[in-house]
Structure formats: structure tokens, C-alpha cells
Amino acid sequence: MPSSDFHTQHSPFGAFASFTIGLHGARGGFGQALGGPAKQNVYVGWRTVGGPWQMLPFFEPPQSKAVDYTGTAEESSNALWRALPPDEFTRTLGWASDTWSTGGLRFAIYSPFDTVPDPTKLSREELAFLLSPSQAVELSFDNKARQETVEIMFGIGDPDNPLRPVADEDPQLAGFAMGGAWGFAAKAGDITRSVQGFSVFDSKFGDEKGLHRIASDGAIIFTVPAGTEKHFALTLGFYAGGTVTTGIEAGYYYTKKFDRLIYVLQHGLEHHAQYAALAELRDAELAASGLNADQQFLLAQATHSYLGSTELLEREGDPLWVANEGEYRMMNTFDLTVDHLFHELKWHPWTISRTLDLFLQRYSYRDTVHSPGGRREEGGISFTHDMGVNNQFSPPGRSSYECTGLDGCFSHMTAEQLVNWVLCACTYGLHTKDSAWLTKHEETLRDCASSLHHRDHPDPRLRTGIIAWDSDRCGHGSEITTYDSLDVSLGQSRNNIYLATKTWAAWLLLEKVFRLSGLHGDAADAASTADSCARAICSKFEEAEGMFPAVFEGGNQSRIIPAVEGLVFPLFLEMREAFARKGRFGDLMSKLEKHLWNILRRGVCLDEKTGAWKLSSTSTNTWMSKIALCQHVVREVFPSAMNEDAEAADAVHAQWESTPGCGAWAMCDQIESDTGKAIGSKYYPRMVTMALWLKK
Amino acid sequence: MPSSDFHTQHSPFGAFASFTIGLHGARGGFGQALGGPAKQNVYVGWRTVGGPWQMLPFFEPPQSKAVDYTGTAEESSNALWRALPPDEFTRTLGWASDTWSTGGLRFAIYSPFDTVPDPTKLSREELAFLLSPSQAVELSFDNKARQETVEIMFGIGDPDNPLRPVADEDPQLAGFAMGGAWGFAAKAGDITRSVQGFSVFDSKFGDEKGLHRIASDGAIIFTVPAGTEKHFALTLGFYAGGTVTTGIEAGYYYTKKFDRLIYVLQHGLEHHAQYAALAELRDAELAASGLNADQQFLLAQATHSYLGSTELLEREGDPLWVANEGEYRMMNTFDLTVDHLFHELKWHPWTISRTLDLFLQRYSYRDTVHSPGGRREEGGISFTHDMGVNNQFSPPGRSSYECTGLDGCFSHMTAEQLVNWVLCACTYGLHTKDSAWLTKHEETLRDCASSLHHRDHPDPRLRTGIIAWDSDRCGHGSEITTYDSLDVSLGQSRNNIYLATKTWAAWLLLEKVFRLSGLHGDAADAASTADSCARAICSKFEEAEGMFPAVFEGGNQSRIIPAVEGLVFPLFLEMREAFARKGRFGDLMSKLEKHLWNILRRGVCLDEKTGAWKLSSTSTNTWMSKIALCQHVVREVFPSAMNEDAEAADAVHAQWESTPGCGAWAMCDQIESDTGKAIGSKYYPRMVTMALWLKK
């Protein structure tokens, strides 16, 4: 029986909002712009009338707040409910759904996602359907075999906030809301009664409608007569009006269509069947994908968390896209953008071009660089690590993350983000065939090429194609990579094989784009740089060991899987000729293949104890998003390296993400490879790199 | 040495916002629309350069969040700071200020309040000055005697949210903000540097400005050279834009003038001196009031908490007043309105008339009533207990609190709220001489008189003047009073001496208003009802014991101080003739005096153990707001009853509110009289009844 003990984010597109649920005995519920699960009790269960409620375990045992008013503690009877143990229910996570079944009860949350065109091109109806900050829920009960009437419940308890009945605002609806921020609703005609009290199980006090409006537990109850089967539609809605960001002032794009929560709830119920059908279509696509069950689970969970970090804003009429960075809430972290690329190119490619434009307009800068020996020269254009944090856009040319004078975490990622802009821009332009956009950015791409050269060496004769100089933005420190917290094998930017192959890929893509643009001189330069970069990497191969070192300096002997990460871009663009063993980069490919043969072994880059993929032989800190990406490269480019042990790790990774060590924070990226416990990057979007698996 | 170990709310007028600080070792800071203190660290301290910071104890020891990013826990050096023990600093709470002094450091928060006219009559400048959601802070250091340079710090750490430097938005300012919601600022030219990091004491990482923008600790540092004394101005600002309520949709009135946080901060600094001077004026007024030190402390703390619950909204251009109910956040709870009356009549009487109008328009209803025997008759007009909760206005004619079928807490308060509307309306009209308003409401007052009669007895010949029937809104239950959770002595509405004397006062005021209006028949009826009510109360006097019972049925033998509560209205209106021992109500006054003589004794209505006033002889649940009100009546009307023990209790009450038993939640109302621990009604506005003490 697979574990059902993990949180999942159920998130509409672009609302930076999640209904989080699933971890046993834990709270969750409606959260907006949070770095982790909200703290509400979620009440879902059933009973035969008069019997105890059989509840899915998504709440902390109620402690009546009546004592705060009456001064006298009251006993709540435990006979009124029981929390179902894990062996009494099943859970199935689909690509766009999450379903629990117990007794005759079926509780499904649908998180449909779809292709979203640039919102400026949407009709009001399309905009409403695609951007509605709502989620569809279906509660069903098969009571055909029973002789007794059954009641089913859906409710929320927010210990910090009294709720309000949504019927106050629309008598056609039943359900509860917290102010104008979030709520749930069903059709009033579908429910038997509403409960609001200090405990949904034991609401001792009620007004003329049976509600106690000062209380923070609210539920709706449906009835299923004996011998029948019933299906009830509910909607979960979020809302945040007005300006929600600083630095750049913007509000949610969905507010163009919805000007308050009740309209979201109405819309959600009206289109409930369409949302459910869309979710089922996505589920069916994943089921038919050919991925194994572990991979399907991982991609489903990853997509859910990705959506929870998406934020589509409106600034003076224009769409403004932000992918937030999970628990850290950094905005459009560039080393996530480059990983989200593959998913976004499928579903909403315009978010990439708009984000690249914003990087260029507001978050680019020009620097000087220095050699390891301290020689100082002109650098060139690059881009910041992120655009701010916690809905606070940072000033132009500055990230929220990068600091000066450091050699590790929080240093600058100048070279890497330069490479990332080139890779994203070329991949976007080539994949979508948006030649107008590419043409518009020709000069910037040439600027990027020049900046890349300067970071290799200011003297063209001494260039190898590998980044070897550091930005002066680092002060007396040095540049790092996105793998900031992993270990030295991946941490430094200079002379790092991870960044070297990624740089090689950047030159390869530049070559193609320049050639298509008729910039033959630039194309030739890019081609020769790609060639020399490949040669330079090959020269670092340790024939005796049959492996590359992670870092080409300081006698480093770490072995890393992301040596092949950069290959994902030409692979995605179907530039298969780059991988030909007897072709232009035959030597590099052969050496990378040997490298993989030798490192994808237990005790090297498969964890000795668990068998999980670990990015570096010298660290137990491993990242799920990058494992997924590199697995795709290995499977597609180096299938001979995908040995039985390496293949078997899917089950380990799925087990990690579906048990509380990671699952307490929905999808997690940074994981300790010998324990499976999340050590950072929780509630995180980046694992949507798994979308690559569908490309096979 | 008086205790300094208590939280105080520092709150601008009408912003439903508090900067809460003062409890030792506890968090607080900026809270908006909360039912208790916020959860931020507040960093205030000084050091000689290079030495450890000497910090006021308003934070929890920092635990660096760096580990969440780096995966590696770092040790923070304890040598960098120390939390000052209570004997190393002093605290002085003024009516509109709160000042801590230690070493040469002086840290003062000013919470000036002033007469606020109806905001529709304010100029834009007056509106800005009176409604600015800001607080002035002054940090001073007297370094005249030292040979070393001193640094002083003000900072905030919000564990849940990275901050942003306000200089991003206005380079003339220094300080930090959390999104658009709150922040603090000083003039950029006044500070030496800003710190933002995982710990203000040990910020290891910084960008080109020394800031680490992903971190949630932010502070500004000032320098005081040896041999000098410096004073620095800071402002604390709050902001919430857009619609903030449901049911009735409204936003904060201050948004008419300020359209974002930065303008609030700029305004606060520009007018810092005026705000500080206004606060000092209020402080001086309290100091000159003739109240003893305990009374001054209590009134100061009460006024602070009152302001934290005030909320001035704008609905379609009109002001909409809400006094929130402390931790419960019920809106315009009527039994608080009637107690806030005396303070509000001094500072902003229009909030009363507007609130009474809203009660009449939206929160009035007509009911039927029943006798204890079950006979059913027409009732009449009355008013709901409140207007909603948690910024959620309840539907017309309905409160958030009142339920059906109950005899205790959460039942209806129909008769009491009817009495309250009459008392508030007449007191407002007579005190402010707003005869136009009174004239407009003549019919309503006649309606109220009729409704009062029906609740006494439908047959005029059987009326006593005392409420004896219950509203059918109670179903099979019965009405309660505001003293819901106290005990049976005060809980029931019917035949209760507390409500009886309050009803007597209502008839007395109606008599006066009707007479002024030329409604002579109504005036005569009111007069005769007041007379008969007084006679009826007198008839319940137990001559042998020299006391009244609390409830005139069921053999009740409780003794209660609020037997005299109703007298506060004619007292406030200077209707001294009502109290003449040989006058119209001489018998009632003499009997109440005897009652007080006998109950204001240890073991009866002074707590046996602590000596505190306790409202009922049969309960240890006692309410500070009502103690204060009744003390005023006793001192002014029955000074002979104010014996030494009764007088000495001020010190007990002040000690309660200035130590953590109550002080953990700023001002508290419901207190256990034998322990001094708050048992409800925390973070509460109602104790502003103490404003009556200034009337002597």
C-alpha cells in the first residue's frame, strides 16, 4: 500500500494560493502567498445518521474555544467522531486530482491546468475559466448497499478567525468564508444543513439558522438516502484584491474579471463540471504517458507544487509573471526559471518571454570581472539571481539573495544567470519559433556572447570556453551556482563541469540562433567556442578513473551527475546531432558516457544506503529537481548508463516525497540522500523539471 | 518598583492596529485586525561600539534562519548581546506614551489621541493628522558623561516574513517594511547604517548596501558620539488598502488621504514633533488629574487598549465606526458601546450617534415576548448584541453572538440592548445638546418606551418597571445580560437588579428627553414608570441583611456591586437631584447606600484573599471595566461606602494589569479575583470606562 501521508498543494494557476491537505493529523487548508501549509483544520467525513463521524485525519482534535467566552472549559465528547487510521482509506494522486476513498465516501479535489495563452489575448470568458482562483471538489457517497441514511461533511476550522456563511451574500450558496480572502461553497439546494460552532462535531449553540457566527469552525452537511449514490459539487475559492506587491506595484490578474470572492465561488460552481472534466483529461494523459507509477506520482506531486508558486499579476494592464520560490518566496529566481522552462514552454510559453524581458529591462546589469590572480577587466551584461522576495520586488539591477564578499551561499551567480538568460532565450525562441522576439533580442544575445567571452578570458587567444573569472560584484569573494548549499563540487561557478557543459550548451544554441538570424560571424564565433569548450572539458577527463572531476582546480575529486545537465537544452530542441558519438562532439559524449557509467553506482552517485540518486559523490545533500532533469538526459542520451540500480531509484524518490520526511511540506527539493528527509527547498516548484519525462 | 512586565497596545485612532510591546521575553510588534499581540521580535537597545548590545527584552532569542537555505546550522554568538533584566530598566506608561529608560537610553512610543470631529467635516490636513495610521517613537541617548561612542538600535524581526528596506521607495528614509502592510522609518540622514539579516546582532551576509534582502530581521542603527546627547525621531506605520470588511463593504477611512504605506511613514516623520507634543499634553493632563498613581496607570493602559480596537471605515464616502471587541473582535458590541460612551462623548461623540443610527437602520428588530409562564404577547423594537465579527458584518437584524434556546452564554440580550439604545441615545443627545438628532429620533424613543413596557408586562396595570418577560428570539431559553459568563447573579436579564436600576435610569432619561421635546404625555408616563421601578426595586430590599439580592426570583442571595451601575447615566448628565437622599428617589438611594456599605467588605464583594473588588459575592469572575464604572458611582454618589479596604483595591487592580497574569494580553477585563489572572476579555477596549474617573 503506497503511503498516503503527505501534503499536496491544490492550486489554481497564477493565484499564488494553495489548498494544502493530506498529511495525517495535520492542519492545512487555504493559504495565500505563504511559504508553507496554512493552519486550518479540514473536516471531511461521513456517518450514518446518529453515529459517530468517520473523519479523514486532516485536523487537530478540536479544543472548543467556548472557554474563552464562558470562562468554563467544556468537555467535547470523543464519541462524536473518530479519525480514520491510514488503513481505512486510500488516496490516489493524479496529475490534476487528489482522491480519497473510504467506506462509500469519495472525496476528490481537482486542480485542472491547461494551456494558458497570453492573457491579453483572452476573452473575458476564457480569462475567467483559466484564471479563476478556485478549485473544484467533489464529494460522493455510494450508499446503494446500505439500509441507513448517510451524512457527509465538508468543513474548515480556522483557529484564528471566525468564519462567515456565504449565504449572507448569495442565498443560492451554502458554505463558509473567511472575510473576503477565501471560502468554500456548494449549491444551497444540495445541502441538508450548515454547521458553525466551536466544534463542527458538537455545535452546542446556534442562531435561527443553527449557526454560531462568532465561531471558527464551519461545515456543510449533505445527505445520502439509503439505496442511493450521490455526487455533490463544491468549490474552494481564494481572493486578494488591490495592490499585493511593492517595488513594482501590481495586483492579481484575476481581479480584472473577479472583483470579490463570491464571484469566484459562483463561477467555480457554475463551471464545476468543466473543471472536473479538464482535470480528468490531465489525469488520463499522465496515466497514458508510459511513465511508471513512481514517476507518475512524482510528476503529479511536482506539478501540484509548481502551480502553488505561480503568480500572474497585472501591472498597468500588462501581465506580470512571477514564479515564487516555494518556502523562500523569492520571485522569479532565475535558476528556477531555467528549470521551469520545459513545463512552461508546453503550457504557457509567453511567461518565459515576458520574464526574460523583465530580467533584461529591470534585472540586468553590467559588471567588471577579475581573474583568480586579481587582474581586473570589463565583464559585460548579466542578470540578477531573482527579482525580490515575499511579493516585494527588489530595486533595479539587484536581487534579494546575492551578497558581496562571499565564497559560498548568498554570493553572486553572475555567470550562471548569464548562461541561463541565453539558454532560456534561445530555447524559447527556437522551440516556439518566435523569430520576432529573437530578432528583437539579437543585440542582447550578442551582448551576452561578449559577456560570456569576458568571463572566460579577456584575451581571445587565451579562451577555453569555460568560465574562469569572477564578477567584481563578489568583492573579495567568488561566484557560486544554483547549487549554493550542496558542496564544493557544485558550489563554485569558476571551472565547474556543471556550468561548463551548460556554457557549452549556451554556445551551441547561440550558434544556431545567430545562424538563423544571418549573423554569420557571430555564429562562427559561437560554433568555435562550443568546440573549444567541449575540447577543454574533455581535457579534464581522468582516463584512469574514467570520470570527470567536478571542479577543474584545487585537485577536486568529487564526481557529479550534473556534468550532463547542460545537455538538456540541445536535447529538448531535438539537436540530436550534438550527441552523435562519432559526430562533432563525439569525444565529449563518449567521455560523459563513461563518466556516467562509473558514477551511477552505489557509493558514488547512488546513495550507499538508500540507492537514491545523489548529485555529488561527496555530499548527501541531493536535489530532486535536478535528479529528474539529469535522469531525462541519461535516459535519452546515455541509455546505456541507466543501469538497474539507477532505474530502481524512482521508487526511493517516490517514497521520500510520499512520506512525512518530505511530504509534511508537499513537494521538497533538497533531500538528505541517506535518510530521505527534506533539508531545504520545501513546498517547492522546481521539481516540475519532471515534465521532461513526458518528452521521451 | 512597579512591574514593567506587561504588554501595551500602541494604536493610532481608528486603524484597528496596534504596535504591542512590553511583556518581558515576548514578541509583539505590528498587528492589524488581530485579537491579540502580533508575533514579531522588537529590537531596542544600545552598546558602546564593539561591545555587546544591551537589549530591552522584547524578543525571543534569535535562531538564524540561514540553516533553511544553507542546510547547515550556524552558531550565533551569545557574546553579541544580552537581554536586560527588569532591574536594569524602568518603564513609565503615560496616558499617551510609554517610555523605557536604561543606561543613557530613552525609548518612548507616543500614542497621541485628540478630539476627532466628524471626519466629513475635516480638511485634508486635519484628516491626515488625526487619522494617520502611525505612531511616533523617540530614541534618545545621553552620552554626555561617557568617553566612548554609543550606538542605538531599533529593529523588527518577523519570523514569517522577509522585510524590505523603505529606502527602496524613498531614499530620504531609512527603516524596514513588510510589504505594504506595516513598517518603521527614520530620516536617512539620522542613521549610521541599516542592518538586514538572519540576525540583527550577527548579519553575516550583505549586498552592496550591507543588506540581506531575503532575511526577516531589519534594524536601523544610530550613533551618539562621546560627550553628546542625541534624540532621534522614528515613525511606526500601518496600512491596509481596499475593502477590508464583508456584509457591508468598506475600507479604512485613512485611505482617503493616504494611498500607500510610504506616505504614512513620510507623514509621520514630518509631523513627529506635533504628535510627540500632543502625547505629552495628554500625559500632563493625566498627571494633573488628581488620580492616584494606580488609577493613572489603569486609565492609561485602558485608553491604549481602547484605541487598539477602534476602526474608522469609509462606506461610499460616509464614515462607518466600529469598536471591535478585543480578543473576540465582535463589532460594535452594544454592551461595550454603552460603556465606551463616556470616553467617546469627550473625544468623538459623533461615533455614538452614527453607531446608534446604524443599530437602528440595520441592527434593530421587532419581536414577540413571553412571560415566565409562557404567555405570548407583542414585544417591540430592540437591537442586536453586535454587528458582526472579524470584520464580517452580520446580516440585518442579526448579531454574531446571539443564539436561540439558551439560558446562559450566547443567549439573546434583547432587553438589555433596548435599554442600552435608550441610554446611549438620551445621554448622547442631552450631553452634546444635539437636539436635532434627538428630535429626529423622537418616534424611535417612543417606540423604545413602548417596547420596554411590553417586556415589563403587556397589561399596564401589572407593570412594575422591571423587565420580567423574555424575547421569543430566545426560543425555550431566556434572556441574558452582558454579564453572560459571570454567574447567575448577573447572568439573567429578567428580574435582575443590575438591569432594573439600568432600566430605571433609562426611564429617567426618557422622561427628561420627552419633556424637552414637549412630549408631555410620554414624559409623564416615563416619570411614573421610573417612580414605580424605583419602588419595585426598593420592595426587594432585605432589611435584615441590609442588602438587595441580585435576582428577584428563585431565592437568589447573591450580592452584586452593579446594583448601582445604572446610576452612572444620571450622574454623568449631572442629574444630581436623582440622588438626593430626601428627594424623589430617596428611598432607593438610601437602600442602595446600605447595600454598598454591607457588600464592600472582604468576603462579600471584596475578594477575601486579594482585596479586589468582585462584582458578585458568589463568583470570583470579576470585570475591571465594570469595577471602574461602579467605583465612579460609589465615589460620587455613595462616598460613605468607599471604605479603606475598598479604596485600597486600586493597587491590587493596577498590580493585576501590570503583571503577566493580565499583562500578557495588554488590558484585560475578566479576571479571577483570587489570583489576578485573566480568564477572558483579553486585549480589550472596555476598561475605558475609567475615563469616568476624570469627571470627579
Image (cartoon, coloured by chain):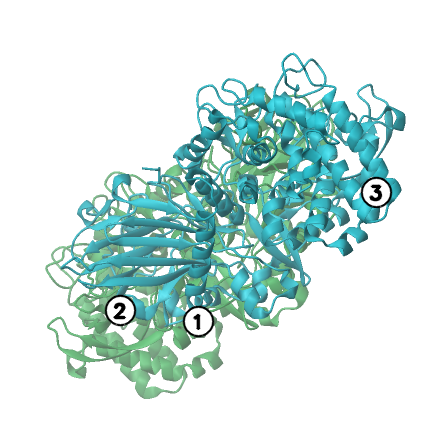
Chain colours: A green, B cyan
Front residue of B136 and B449: B449
Mark 1 packing: few (<14 Cα in 10 Å), some, or many (20+)?
many
Residue B59 seen anywhere in this rendered image of the structure: no
Q: Give the alpha-carbon distance from disc 2 to disc 1, as whole Å.
A: 33 Å
Residues at discs 1 and 3 both on one chain: no
Q: Which residue is mark 1?
A: A428
Inspect the image, locate mark 3, and give the three-letter code of the amino acid beneath it.
Arg
Above or below A258: residue B283:
above
Above or below B143: residue B569:
above
Percent position (x, y) of residue B206?
26, 62
Residue at disc 3, secondary structure: helix
Q: Chain of mark 1?
A: A
Q: Chain of mark 3?
A: B
Residues under numbered marks 1 and 3 in contact, where contact means CB atoms less than 8 Å apart: no
Percent position (x, y) of residue B36?
48, 42
Q: Which residue is mark 2?
A: B208
Nearer the observer: mark 2 or 1; the answer is: 2
Q: Name the mark on residue B446.
A: 3
Identify which residue is drawn at 13% across, 70% down: A372
Front residue of A583 and A622: A622
